[in-house]
Amino acid sequence: MSINILLVEDDIDLAATIVDYFEVESISCDHAANGVHGLALVEAHDYQVILLDINLPEMDGFTLCQKIRESSNDTPILMLTARDTLVDKVTGFDAGTDDYLVKPFEIEELLIRVLALSKRRSGQVSKLSFGKLVLQLRERLAFFDGRELKLTPITFKLLEKLMRESDKPVSRAVLMHAVWGEDQPDSNSLKVHIHHLRKQLEKVQANLLIDTEPGYGFSLREKTP
Amino acid sequence: MSINILLVEDDIDLAATIVDYFEVESISCDHAANGVHGLALVEAHDYQVILLDINLPEMDGFTLCQKIRESSNDTPILMLTARDTLVDKVTGFDAGTDDYLVKPFEIEELLIRVLALSKRRSGQVSKLSFGKLVLQLRERLAFFDGRELKLTPITFKLLEKLMRESDKPVSRAVLMHAVWGEDQPDSNSLKVHIHHLRKQLEKVQANLLIDTEPGYGFSLREKTP
DNA sequence: AGGGGCGTTAAATCAGGGTTAAGAAACTTT
DNA sequence: AAAGTTTCTTAACCCTGATTTAACGCCCCT
């Protein structure tokens, strides 16, 4: 199986070294010298791993990483950071980074991590089921017994979280965090989306329901009438 | 099964080292640099283990620990204490700590303890029993000998507190605090809820009763007629 | 006999959750 | 760039059940 990765790095010499090294290992490695070009490549290809330098002209690594994640692309991203500061790391993980490497690094070390990340991706489950309900995570599709549920991005995330914790009640705070992350809407959005989700479950005649735990949260269960 | 922990530590370098080390062990480790942020994260996630430094800006480790326990969260907590003073240890265990580690420590030692605590938790069913009476804390359900008690949030908290101190009388003040925390209703709510609780115990024919200690409080006991 | 503490009851109030619709924002299409 | 479409947020409303409140009765005690 061939591996196809992208390197976004403005240091031409370093980039050349990496690309060369990876070619020898028969890993095909595209290269962009700035963030804008990098983003264009990401949108046009399906990479197994993306390597981002943090200091980039035009658009820095964090911003690029965020933009990639915003387009719901979950390709593993490895950050190349110049200094070993925690601020960088934390911001990086927050922006959706999967791993990082501090410069200067051994190129063998980079290879190992790239292989690990590409493996993680291919080993990643892309389907999530609960009874006859199936989520295709990559395609963002949901089916109950073959019938499709029409879900918006938010209701999809909601259902995903409920399914990952199925049969356990999930607190409102945890649900909100799963959907909106740090900055959450100030009002009753959650219950509106729960309502949409319930309607969709009805519409496909799923034998499932979203149970409310008063004062706490919700749980996804099978109907037991 | 993936492990998910929280580290609350204001020493950025130390935090970086720990987060780093744990990531390598594929333990995902969130980080907060102060108590307030830490508390927010605890409320929004379901961690397997929480690591607390004692000296923290804004809210120290003990206080944070107490607040976590007050929200009936029983996630194992490990304290990182700067000095090996007996006072610290005692206060810590009193506040609801499960383990502590004295700085400076070997990071391998920390890993071992985290793994031990996370195992303890996963083996733990969050159930509380007294005779045939069982509270399922996560699911917020109560059963006597298989029959379910219909409890409202307040009566549930009441019963929980009585069970945690079972066979001992619990003062009104302590009960009120367990249910309402700081701002409590000004009138006779407590006795009304005690009454509801007694009715529920009758309804499931529990051989238990809530005994009144005149002028003091209540205790949960077995009937001994 | 009367007062205090407790138990019981019912009514009044409140809060949480469900539903709906309108407008804002984001994204598509032309 | 404009129009149209979908999705998200907000706010208003309703309903139910939980909670508080207040009133009353009981019993024990001195």
Image (cartoon, coloured by chain):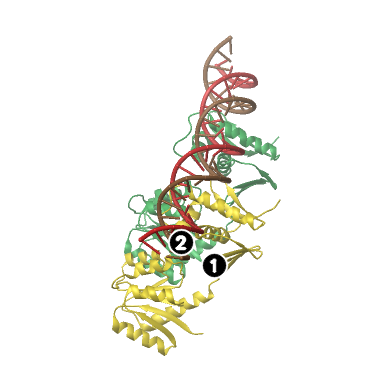
Chain colours: A yellow, B green, C brown, D red
At horizontal 52% and vertical 50% (from top left) the residue drawn is A192
Report the side of A142 relative to A34 (left or right): right
Which quadrant of the view contains residue B213?
A: top right
Report the side of B121 relative to B11 (left or right): right
- The percent position of residue A175, horizontal first and vertical second, equals 50, 55
Under mark 2, the amino acid is Ile
The residue beneath circle 2 is: B5
Does residue A76 appear in this view?
yes
At horizontal 49% and vertical 35% (from top left) the residue drawn is B173
Picture disc at residue B130: none
Report the side of A19 relative to A196 (left or right): left
- The percent position of residue B42, horizontal first and vertical second, equals 45, 54
Check the image and report above or below for B73 versus B207: below
Check the image and report above or below for C15 versus A181: above
At horizontal 57% and vertical 41% (from top left) the residue drawn is B162
Residue lying furthest bottom: A24
Does residue B86 appear in this view?
no
At horizontal 54% and vertical 63% (from top left) the residue drawn is B119
Which quadrant of the view contains residue A160?
A: bottom right
Element assignment for label 2: strand
Q: Residues within 10 Å of mark 2 (few under 14, many from 20)?
A: many
The residue beneath circle 1 is: A137
Q: Give the chain letter at badge 1.
A: A
Check the image and report above or below for B6 versus A82: above
- The percent position of residue A133, horizontal first and vertical second, equals 63, 62
Element assignment for label 1: loop
Q: Give the chain letter at badge 2.
A: B
Under mark 1, the amino acid is Leu
